[in-house]
Image (cartoon, coloured by chain):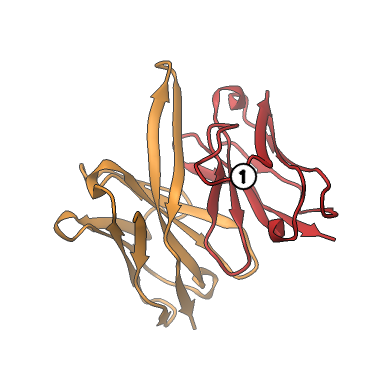
Chain colours: A red, B orange
Amino acid sequence: QSVLTQPPSASGTPGQRVTISCSGSSSNMGSIYIYWYQQLPGTAPKLLIYMNNQRPSGVPDRFSGSKSGTSASLAISGLRSEDEADYYCATWDGSMLFGGGTKLTVL
Amino acid sequence: QVQLVQSGAEVKKPGASVKVSCKAFGFTFTDFDINWVRQAPGQGLEWLGWMNPHSGNTGYSQKFQGRVTVTRNTSITTAYMELSSLRSEDSAVYYCARAQRGVVATIFHFYYIDVWGKGTTVTVS
């Protein structure tokens, strides 16, 4: 089964561009989609990116996703205070697997 | 409006079972899988299993196999997750969530959660 590894924390100042990585360990990671979720404090997660780089309706284009080989990244440009949240990558390979999450702090 | 409304908080004794409900609004209940995910205090997201409300087919995380059961009542568009033999480590917020499933170019399968319930707090003490 895949293991998705994220850095536990990330930070940036308002207006900055921040990236959060998500590394897979499965040999077949190249054929799998990655999804990203944002969890604001005290709330349920929210879908941010699906199928590696697609944004659901309503998600600002400041958020973008990419994937190359066994690694994926979430980029947030024009960082804002309201982006302070936990971010999770996820994938499906017959069961759902979440990364450990990255706590983003806006300094 | 698409939403999943979950039942209220539960407090259970160790060894007991808990059953959480999840009522769907605003979409055709039998067209989407329902998944269950939990989050222990200060921890990350952990997947428990899925169910197809149309067929009743289910799949569970190996970690919870034998302890978790997901069912549904299509007449009231409600899914249920029952977790048995509770222990203190099962104290968490339990989320139900709708999933999108499909295939691109006949070979690339996608499956992801696009709608989450607000969560149900289960305390085992």
Look at the picture and state if B112 lies above or below A67: below
Question: Is residue B83 at all visible to an observer of this figure?
Answer: no
Question: Is residue B91 at all visible to an observer of this figure?
Answer: yes
A22 or B123, which is in the foreground?
Answer: A22
Image quarter where the N terminus of chain B lies is: bottom left
* Amino acid type indicated by mark 1: Pro
Residue B121 position in % (x across, y down): 47, 74
Q: Secondary structure at mark 1?
A: loop
Residue A106 position in % (x across, y down): 80, 59
At horizontal 45% and vertical 46% (from top left) the residue drawn is B114
At horizontal 40% and vertical 70% (from top left) the residue drawn is B85
Residue that protrudes farthest toward the left in the picture: B75
CA neighbours of label 1 inside 10 A, class few (<14), some (14 to 19), many (20+): few
Q: Is residue B87 toward the left or the right of residue B2 in the image?
A: right
At horizontal 63% and vertical 49% (from top left) the residue drawn is A88
Quarter of the view holding residue A59: top right
Look at the picture and state if B118 lies above or below A26: below
Quarter of the view holding residue B25: bottom left
Q: Is residue A78 toward the left or the right of residue B45 in the image?
A: right
Residue A51 position in % (x across, y down): 53, 32
At horizontal 35% and vertical 54% (from top left) the residue drawn is B2
> What residue sits right under mark 1 in the picture?
A60
Look at the picture and state if B69 lies above or below A56: below
Number of numbered labels in the structure image:
1
